Image: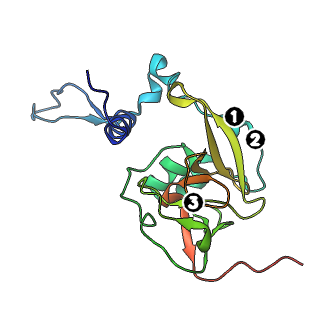
Amino acid sequence: MRFPSFPVILRTLYTFSNVTTRTAPRIQGINPFTRVTTLKSMPTIPFLGSLFSTSSSRNMSYPVQKSSSEWQAVLSPEQFRVIREKGTEAPFTGEYDKHMPSSGVYTCAACSAPLYRANHKFKSGCGWPAFFDALPGAVTRHTDRTFGMARTEIVCSNCGGHLGHVFKGEGYPTPTDERHCVNSVSMKFDEKEPEAKV
């Protein structure tokens, strides 16, 4: 038996995490062909919810505090799903995957806090923007035990928004031998470098 490749596993997990369900057709008034569509996330199913449990970052306190309704008012539905509900965008679809500027800074899409310098970005071929280091204090790391494995989740230190995950020891020719795998929807790009604090 041949083991599936990593991209196949990734697409499968992405598909399952974004599954939709349909309710049975209901007869409403005269039109018996009305169909109600209910979108449900898999984590609402009790048994499967344990596979999709979140990291300890939900219990942390961050300088920027907003309710879910306040975040929904300022974020797009996709940004809210990824940043606040710890989702993942599909690989090779993000705005910043192939974006390779020589200067500038990537900021948090939720709170605009500076996160990464453009010159820390590198081509990893993983399908998401990859950085070898963050700005000092910009990113907080947590252990993420979703999907039955332990990974290092990274969140914005200012608002707690989910950015992605860090992977170590993959052999990329970078100074840190780390890959910060970040969702494009979690960031915005600013051509101006952050000012040094005095």
- Between disc 2 and disc 3, the foreground one is 3
Would you say 49 lies left or right of 10 here?
right
Q: Relative to the observer, which residue lies in front, 95 or 6?
A: 6
Spatial CA distance of label 3 from label 1 is: 31 Å
Residue 139 located left or right of residue 94: right
The answer to the question of whether label 2 and label 3 lie on touching residues, with beta carbons closer than 8 A, is no
Residue 182 sits above or below residue 18 on the image? below
Foreground mark, 3 or 1, reads 3
Q: Which residue lies at the image location 42% right of the left edge and 68% below the top edge?
A: 98
Contact, mark 2 vs mark 1 (Cβ under 8 Å) = yes
Mark 1 Cα within 10 Å, few/some/many (few <14, many 20+)? few
Residue receiving disc 2: 60
- From the viewer's side, name the closer residue of 70 and 116: 116
| Disc 2 to disc 3, C-alpha distance | 33 Å
Label 3, residues with CA under 10 Å away: few <14, some 14-19, many ≥20? few
The numbered disc on residue 173 is: 3
Residue sitting farthest toward the right: 198
Q: CA distance from mark 2 to mark 1?
A: 7 Å
Task: Name the outermost residue toward the top.
Answer: 47
Q: Residue at x 55, y 80 (%)?
A: 102
Q: Which mark is residue 56?
A: 1
Question: Sequence order check: which comes first, mark 3 or mark 1?
Answer: 1
Task: Estimate the x, y position of residue 117 in percent, counting from the top left.
Answer: 64, 71
Which is more toward the observer, 103 or 185? 103
- Amino acid tagged 1: Ser
Q: Which mark is residue 8?
A: none
Could you tell me residue 143's position as x and y percent?
A: 67, 35
